Amino acid sequence: MPSATSPRTGADPRTSRAEPATARPTVHRPLAFFSLSMGALTLATLIGVAADDRVLNGAPIWLKPLHFAFSLAVYGATLAWLLPRIERFPRAAWWAGTLIAVSSFAEAFIISVQAGRGTYSHFNMTTPVNTAFMHSMTVAVIVLWTSNFVAAILVLRDRSLAPALRWAVRLGLALAVVGMALGMLMNTPTAEQQQALDAGLPTLVGAHNVGVADGGAGMPLTNWSTQGGDLRIPHFVGIHALQVLPLAALGLAALARRRPGSPLADESARARLVIVLGAFWTGLLAIVTWQALRGQALIHPDTATLAATGLVVLAGAVASAAALRLRR
């Protein structure tokens, strides 16, 4: 008597109905919870900026926690959507995401506590308590970077997403890892700080700015320096490639659906465009890093910076045109 099996899978449909397969989650729950908590912290620190008139180094005391909370909320939401879609080594992806959530929460918690105490969260080795917070945050950052690096490797090995989105996620996560690593440039002590360390005096160790002291005039919202180089800029540009590139891939897919006869209807053309955008973003990251390390403010580029930016833009435009003209 022939067995009753599914023509596609060979599985007994009666068994399938009796023992349904466990559906994979559509979001990474620890990261989703973390992102929601950072959203709540964003609102709380926004209220703090408005209600608390304390100032630290020329900026509202709650502005830094606000920046971190908003940035981490967006970053966590992106990974909460992405990681469950990795088909190879899903367990490793879950653990990487969980460690990202825990370490990021620890960093945001320390930054907020130190703001509440009215003191610096980063670079602060002025007292035993501040030093303990600083060392704890350093451990959290190391775990965060390592977990992101593991997630990037898993994404590189996975082929479950459509080509354009797959390349967007691969390049975005790789650039995010680089952006996090660039943040370590801020931990180098200035000449004055090194003198204090050599003399055994309590001091901050590290700075955001290059060429000028921290705490000078800054841009609206971001507070990036308008007088000298600011290492927070390449840190930001690198990390948020993980949002820019996938959003670009999704936008190209939406345009392709609206214009089925256009070159964008070709999935391979969209993938090539995403790769070009990734190369452009890499060039932009290199330029803002170079600019910051030379002590140059973002809004006051010199001729060399403008020339380099122009070359990157021109190369991106030519490569984009070529990507649309190529055929498989």
Image (cartoon, rainbow, N blue to C red):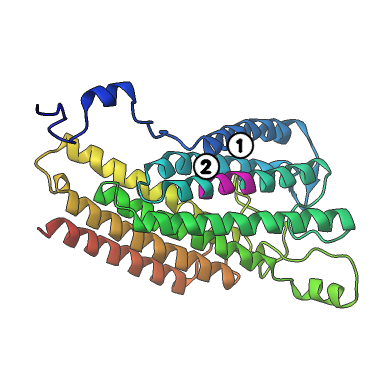
Name above or below for residue 164 compared with residue 196: above
Residue position for label 1: 38
Residue at 66 percent across and 70 percent down: it is 211
Left or right: residue 7 versus residue 139 is left
Queried whether the magenta region covers residue 102, the answer comes back as yes
Instruction: Tell me residue 280's x, y (percent).
Output: 35, 62
Q: Is residue 8 above or below residue 299?
A: above
- The percent position of residue 49, horizontal first and vertical second, equals 71, 36
Q: Is residue 57 left or right of residue 159?
A: right
Magenta highlight on residue 225 = no
- Please provide percent x and percent y for residue 308: 40, 71
Query: From which residue to which does the magenta span run?
Result: 96-103
Quarter assignment of residue 38: top right
In what quadrant of the picture does the C terminus appear? bottom left
Counting from the top left corner in percent of width and height, residue 65 is at 68, 43
**Badge 2 is on which residue?**
76
**Which of the pair 163/1 is nearer the observer?**
1
Q: Secondary structure at mark 1?
A: helix
Q: Is residue 6 left or right of residue 228?
A: left
305, 274: nearer the viewer: 274
